[in-house]
Image (spheres, rainbow, N blue to C red):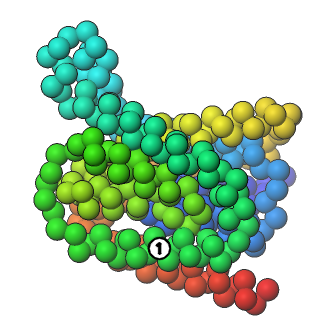
Amino acid sequence: MFDFKIVFLGVIQGLTEFLPVSSSAHLSFFQSLFDYQNMLGYDIILHMATLFALLLFFRKDIFIFTLEWTKGFRKSEYRKSTGWSYGWIILFGTVVTASIAIPLKSTVAKAMDSPIIVAMGLFCTSLLLWYIGNIKTRERKLSLTTGLLVGFIQGIAVMPGVSRSGSTIFMGRLAGLSGEEAFRFSFLISIPAIAGATLLEIIEMFKIGRVTLPPYWWLGALLAFSLGFCSLVILRNFVIKGRWKCFSIYCSALAFLMILLNVVR
């Protein structure tokens, strides 16, 4: 039978995974409104759908940078290419992310059950987004130091309510990157992190045993993929134009609503 909640989850995943509004906060919010249980298999499918949307959006950068990075091991002239530096910066930044995010796994699981903690994370996100618009553009080149800083804040952003895209773009801009470069690096460094998190979920699924998918899971996955790609297009335009305050106001409003519902209940 058709279940509206299944399709709705796909829509939420697609809209919030990349926009700086914290997908974890939305998951926590709607879990408190609806009974979402035993959805691990479907959750993995939705994360894979938005990951494919990310790979499609950055397909040219991924192809060129990967080609230049691998050729750098064989030919010295490629060690001066953008792909060579990008590859190593993403690698070291990802190591920093993993060293922070993995130990926080149990803490994050507990925090997801607390609307107050999630709301506090949203307020932090709101402040970062409000401040981004005031950062002056300096057009600095990407460096290892910037990559490590972005990797660090990406690890912290596993906390519910803290937007991964918003916090990493903020750190990139604070380090002197242009809006376009901060946007690109934010999502390129997210690929191994998202893929790694999805792999951990798959391992967890195999530990549980047989996992079934709900009816019309494919429709939810298709919506997550389509809306995820559209969200990247929208965010890129907002980043270039420096329009962050609408996201900031939205995060504050959602945080206030979560606290209000918690008090009423």
Q: Which residue is mark 1?
A: 124
5 w.r.t. 245: above or below: above
Quadrant of residue 191 in the image? top left
Residue 10 location, x and y as percent?
A: 63, 54
- Residue 263 in sight in this render: yes
Q: Position of residue 207 (x, y in %)?
A: 81, 34
Quadrant showing the C terminus: bottom right
Q: How many marks on residues? A: 1
Q: Residue at x 82, y 64 (%)?
A: 35
Q: Is residue 70 left or right of residue 105?
A: left
Q: In the picture shown, does residue 118 fall above or below 96?
A: below
Q: Is residue 17 above or below residue 191?
A: below
The three-letter amino acid code for the residue at tag 1 is: Cys
Q: Which residue is at 61% across, 66% downward?
A: 26
Is residue 142 or residue 185 the one in the foreground? 142
Nearest the eye: 174 or 195? 174
Residue at 59 percent across and 63 percent down: it is 160
Counting from the top left corner in percent of width and height, residue 257 is at 61, 83
Q: Secondary structure beneath disc 1?
A: helix
Q: Is residue 228 left or right of residue 145?
A: right
Crowdedness near tag 1: few (<14), some (14–19) or many (≥20) residues, C-alpha within 10 Å = some
In this picture, residue 25 sits left or right of residue 212:
left
The percent coordinates of residue 33 (x first, y second) are 75, 73
Look at the image and tell me whether residue 231 can be seen: no
Left or right of residue 79: residue 193: right
The part of the image, by quadrant, that contains residue 165 is bottom left
Which residue occupies 43% across, 55% down?
Answer: 153
